[in-house]
Image: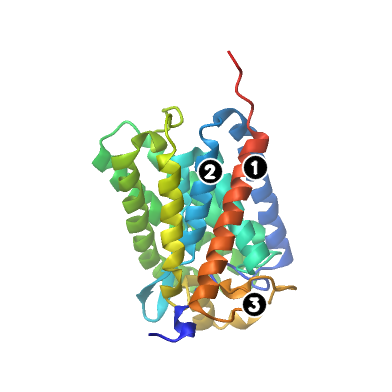
Amino acid sequence: MLPAPFLKPVAMHIPDGFLSAPIALIFWTVSILFIVIAVRNARSNFNDRQIPLMGIMAAFIFAAQMINFPVIGGTSGHMIGGVLAAVTLGPWGGILVMTSVVSVQGLLFQDGGLLVMGANIFNMGVLPVLIGYGFYRAVISSSKMVRLFTIAAAAWLSVIAGALFTGLQLWLSGTSPLQIVIPAMLGIHALIGIGEALITVAAVAFILRTRPDLIDAQANAPRGGKSWILAGVLTALAVILVSPLASVDPDGLESVAEQLGFNSLGMSAPYQLISDYNIPGLGDTHLSTILAGLVGAVIVGLIAFVIIRMIRKPEKSI
């Protein structure tokens, strides 16, 4: 059996210290603007039957992000999930779900900085969702193969777009020169994007085969039975159970930071709750990682569920 340090998920998001205060503030403002727009639009676009899907998708994406896969040269990547959220929930539900995931990761697991959370929400939530929905909307009436190919392209591009904006934020913050950080970020994330595309297409293809109504933007919410809810819960649980097998190689941003020499700028969180995805008192063990994943998935799922339930308009009784 491999030693526990090899089996632990690693940090994924921008930490505090990488971005300047003005850049962090700008992206907080931009992200809040998109969140407000998403809340307003979600009020009229969701009904009672769709509410559980928000929670299930949030839990699954959180679980999927815990698993880093090796890429090349000692670097790893992980799924973002923004395109999957956009295809299944639309742009507004997708933004709310991704915001829930990134926020819980930062606040509870110290995965990503608090001051730069606005940038993380934009890079990993808003941007991928908008790209994913825009691409999918353009081919929604096309054949299954065309839609899957387009989703793959959107998933790959969403990773590239997030990497590009991260590079720009680092440059504007004076962390690294533009001509160095952009090629470094895009080079490694072009490979990570392939993994994102494959995972997203696999998930969408499965849904298209079993419950195509879940990703038909023109269809009503699924009716009858709750088997799809159970399937979603079990899938998220299965992902969490294998999360201890994640690669410990540094992820794309961490690898670039090490190569370009600004990794030391990262600041630790001012508090520790379930840092490094380990339950306090259980140490760095497989069980600790699995339990942390379960806690995170439940919390992020409940948050997304409660948010959409609170903001959606009640259905009119006939």
- Relative to 250, is 44 on the left or the right? right
- The local crowd at label 3, few if under 14, some if 14 to 19, many if 20 or more residues have their Cα within 10 Å, is some
Residue 170 point in image, percent of width and height: 59, 68
Labels 2 and 3: the sequence-earlier one: 2
Q: Is residue 301 placed above or below 119 in the rendered structure? A: above
Q: Is residue 116 placed above or below 81 in the rendered structure? A: below
- Relative to 145, is 84 on the left or the right? right
Q: Is residue 232 visible?
A: yes
Mark 3 to mark 1: distance in Å?
Answer: 32 Å
Secondary structure category for the residue under label 2? helix
Residue sitting at x 56%, y 31%: 48
Q: Are marks 1 and 2 in contact (CB under 8 Å)?
A: yes
Labels 1 and 2: the sequence-earlier one: 2
The quarter of the picture where residue 38 lies is top right
Residue sitting at x 41%, y 37%: 214
Q: Amino acid at mark 3?
A: Gly
The quarter of the picture where residue 156 lies is bottom left
Q: Amino acid at mark 1?
A: Ile
Identify residue for label 1.
307
Labels 3 and 1: the sequence-earlier one: 3
Identify residue for label 3.
266
Closer-to-camera residue (126/2): 2
Residue 47 point in image, percent of width and height: 55, 30
- The local crowd at label 2, few if under 14, some if 14 to 19, many if 20 or more residues have their Cα within 10 Å, is many
Residue sitting at x 37%, y 81%: 73
Closer-to-camera residue (216/137): 216
- Relative to 96, is 188 on the left or the right? left
Assign the C terminus to one quadrant of the image: top right
> How many numbered tags mark residues here?
3
Residue 80 point in image, percent of width and height: 47, 58
- Identify the disc placed on residue 54: 2
Residue 57 point in image, percent of width and height: 49, 48
